[in-house]
Image: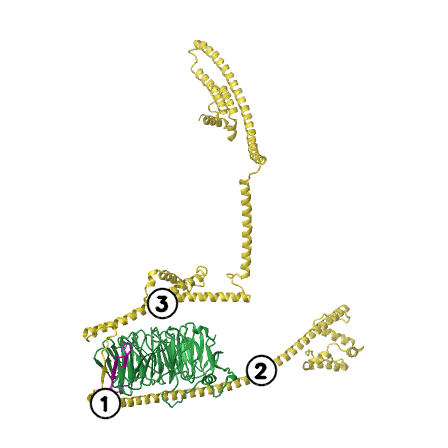
Chain colours: A green, B yellow
Amino acid sequence: MDFSELFKLSGLLGRFSPDGKCLASCVQYRLIIRDVNTLQILQLYTCLDQIQYIEWSSDSLFILCAMYKRGIVQVWSLEQPDWHCKIDEGSAGLVASCWSPDGRHILNTTEFHLRITVWSLCTKSVSYIKYPKACQQGIAFTKDGRYMAVAERRDCKDFVSLFVCSNWQLLRHFDTETQDLFGIEWAPNGCVLAVWDTCLEYKILLYSLDGRLLSTYQAYEWSLGIKSIAWSPSSQFLAIGSYDEKVRILNHVTWKKITEFEHPATVTNTKTIVYKEVEKSPSVETERFSFPPTRALASSVFSTQSKYDISQVPVSFQYIKPVADRANPKMGIGMLAFSPDNCFLATKNDNIPNAVWIWDIQKLKLFVVLEQLCAIQSFQWDPRQPRLAVCTGNSKVYLWSPAGCVSVQVPTEGDFQIVSLCWHPSGDSMALLSKDNFCVCYLEREELCRQIFP
Amino acid sequence: MGDWKTVTVPVLSSDSKNIFQYTSEKKISPPNMNSQVLRLPLPSSKSMHSFFSAFCTEENIEQSISYLNRELTTLGFPSIYAESKGKELNLISIINCMNELLVLQHKNLRAQEEVEMQHLKLGSDMDHLQNCYAKLKEQLELSKREIVGLQERDRQLQSKNRNLHQLLKNEKDEVQKLQNIISSRATQYNHDMKRKEREYNKLKERLHQLVMNKKDKKIAMEVLNYVGRADGKRGAWRTDKTEARNEEQMYKVLLNDYEQRQKQLLLENAELKKVLQQMKKEIISLLPPQKQKPKERSEDGPVLSDLEEDIGELNKENMWELSCETVREQLTNSIRKQWRMLKNHVEKLDNQVSRVHSGTLNDKDVISREDHELETEKLELEIQQCKEMIKTQQQLLQQQLMSPCDDDTTLLLQDCYLLEERERLQEEWRLFQEQKKNFEKERRSFTEAAIRLGLERKAFEEDRGAWLKQQFLSMSTDYKQSENVTTPSAFIGTSDQDNRVVNSMSQQKKPHCMLSGPISAESCQTSQYISHNSFNAALKKPAGDSKPNQWEESDKEETE
């Protein structure tokens, strides 16, 4: 495993291009495009204000930078560095911005969610979508980029509009039986749209592409409901993580629950493997001490090595009960992700913040639990194989695959607290992002096998 | 014992007291039988004398005798007096009476002993029963106390149960109440939210209007030059046609997805059906043949026949293509039935095994493993033996057939066979020779008879000639007298005689049909013939009278 040196970063804005050739990163108001393999700067763009959001177009030819404070979106071209485009929303303000799947339209959500403006880079046409819903995931594109679903709210009722992305024609417009729509997400096959309600109401609705309601699922009433959902890559399963610390899996044939995954504080099943991260005491050679201590020495002294031990079942985890009188409590299943081969599901129970639970979907059983020393910040699956990368806010990156798991210390000088990570589309490398820096980690093909802790 | 009468003997006044005492003692005896028993049977030797002297003294001998006599007679004994009213005592009768009394005494003693024994037994039984009774009473007391205790506990538990139920009900009520509260609050919040949202919408509208009205020139897009579309095509107007096309596209996508899913499901279905069919076949093969135990399967009888029909039906190829409700149901039902049968069968086998292990093997149908093994061993031995036998026999046979042994033995062997035949032939030759002899004898006799016949005929002819001469001579003289009557009769008589002779001869030779005329020549011929064809004739079974026939037949055969 090779690590690059640290580079500056701001706002956790480090993104690989969809074709995998470039890596875009932002430092304040500068956008830096690097080559993935050499990390040499290919392009350098300067924007008008601090960049809050960047996004590559689907063909990797353009990149947009959104500056919400100024209400400006700037688009840069990689082919023609001289080309520029600036979209100014003016007094309408800007809250969110994203590309359309064809890479030629930009959808800006104005302040207060007054409207969504569709700016075209090809023509002079502008489209407006009125009454968009002010929710977390209000816009969803199908994987093939043909259709777009937009959540709307009119007269205190929720609606969903389906648009054809090629000409922005309104295909379907239907109301949903939700109290307060929280999010929408397309299934990877593009035929089913999942619509779920606010956490006050556990309700998820499944709509077909032509607007018919296929099914409704409600696990229970009154308690806090859905926190996160994830579709399996084959569209066979829909995993729903809720505030009651359970994940419910629905199947695509009957849309009924096939199983429930519980996340208890104590794991007793003997077939589950629990990897516990333990610290290895560093070996310090006292002769090499000098005053003042060099940076490298300091970092090596203060950074502790860690390794994984297999804990004997039954294992108890550190369980945190959140304060009852706060909104959006830190409980329930906050993160859900399916592996790309559809075999595993990684979850995180916010009540047990140090553990990642990996479920075997073929057997519908708990497979592995990774118990870390610090709270999990984020995890992501390798886009090509069942390999999970986890970061916990320290300078280590943890990799798990069915063969085993490994903890790797990023060799850096100074502090590097990895807060987020992002895989390269090919799965050969990943970008580790911290608040101020980022580094790129290159993985060799057979890397994991050699370094596996059995 | 206390039924002795009080007898007053007026004379024995001095002894009467004793007697009274005696009898009264006896009367008192019942309550204190035990003690009395000890005392009663045999008074001690000391008292005996006094007792005896008390009863009879020299003064009252006669009275005592008469008294005794009376007593004895009343008891059924014969009188001790010699005569009915005499005073002479019959000694024999006295002795007899005494003996009788002794015997009676012994009997009584024995009876008494028995009674005492029984008395003891009954006493001990009584004790035992009393003890049992006491124990049972104690047990009863204990049980009653236990029952009371348990009842008390039961009452306590029931009251606890009731309390818990009450608590549960309370909790449920509370939960229900809380839920009601929550729902009412939720509706209130929703209502408030809606109100606020409406207000917010109004503000948004206002703001939107203001923003739009301002005609902010800033809201614009500055772009160096417009970029071509991603797919290189030109933009198209939005028309109805495009709308229709979009709809069509959407439905195509949906249908594609459904078709794919259906294909997958069909594949899965087909595989599962195959698996079910295999399972069914295997289950059928595992089940025992149904002919053996029709009784036990009486309930499944009609089911079986249905099953067989079903099996026949469902095994048809085209049935698998159908996925209609009934076929599916049939399949699943048949599999369920068969699985149930298999389960029963396995359970039965388990029971049998357990019974064998426990040793209570009564069922004839079940053969224990050891017996089975013994049988198989025996059968195997038999088979082995038979095989060996067959082998040896085969070997011997082969030896015989293909034995390239030396000439002597072969000749010997051959000779053996020929010897047998030769002997047989000799036997037949002997027989034939005998027959030949017999025949020769007969022929000789026959020829003699024939010669005799010739001679007689000659003589007859001469006589006839002479007679004719005579007749002729007489005819000429006695023509008118009597010639018709005698000649025919004479002729008849002679012809009859001849005939009779011939007949007798022919009777003798009746079987010899062709014998006439030159008999001797023929017989010579036949004798010659016989010598040539001895073999053939001998072979034919010789019967005494039918020899010539055979010869004739052989004659015919030869000519043929």
Which quarter shows the N terminus of chain B? bottom right
Mark 2–mark 1 CB contact (< 8 Å) = no
Q: Which residue is mark 1?
A: B207
Label 3 is found on which chain of the structure? Answer: B
Label 2 is found on which chain of the structure? Answer: B
Q: Which residue is mark 2?
A: B139
Task: Kindly state the secondary structure of the residue where label 2 is placed.
Answer: helix
Q: Which mark sits nearer the N-terminus, 3 or 2?
A: 2
Q: Determine if the magenta segment contains residue A82.
A: yes
Mark 2 and mark 1: span between their CA atoms? 98 Å
Q: Is residue B116 depicted above or below B406 in this figure?
A: below
Give residue A149's position: percent from left, percent from top.
27, 79
Q: Which residue is mark 3?
A: B268
In depth, the one of B300 and A156 nearer the eye is A156
Q: Are marks 3 and 2 on the same chain?
A: yes
Q: What segment carries the magenta color?
A: A75-95
Task: Kindly state the secondary structure of the residue where label 3 is placed.
Answer: helix
Q: Amino acid at mark 3?
A: Glu
Instruction: Assess disc 3: are there few (<14), some (14-19) or many (≥20) residues with their C-alpha within 10 Å of its C-alpha.
Output: few
Q: Is residue B82 visible?
A: no
Q: Are marks 1 and 3 on the same chain?
A: yes
Give residue A281's position: percent from left, percent from top.
50, 82
Say which of marks 1 and 3 sits in front: 1
* Residue found at x 31% / y 73%: A189
Q: Which mark sits nearer the N-terminus, 1 or 3?
A: 1
Q: Amino acid at mark 2?
A: Gln
Q: Determine if the magenta segment contains residue B179.
A: no
In depth, the one of B185 and B473 nearer the eye is B185
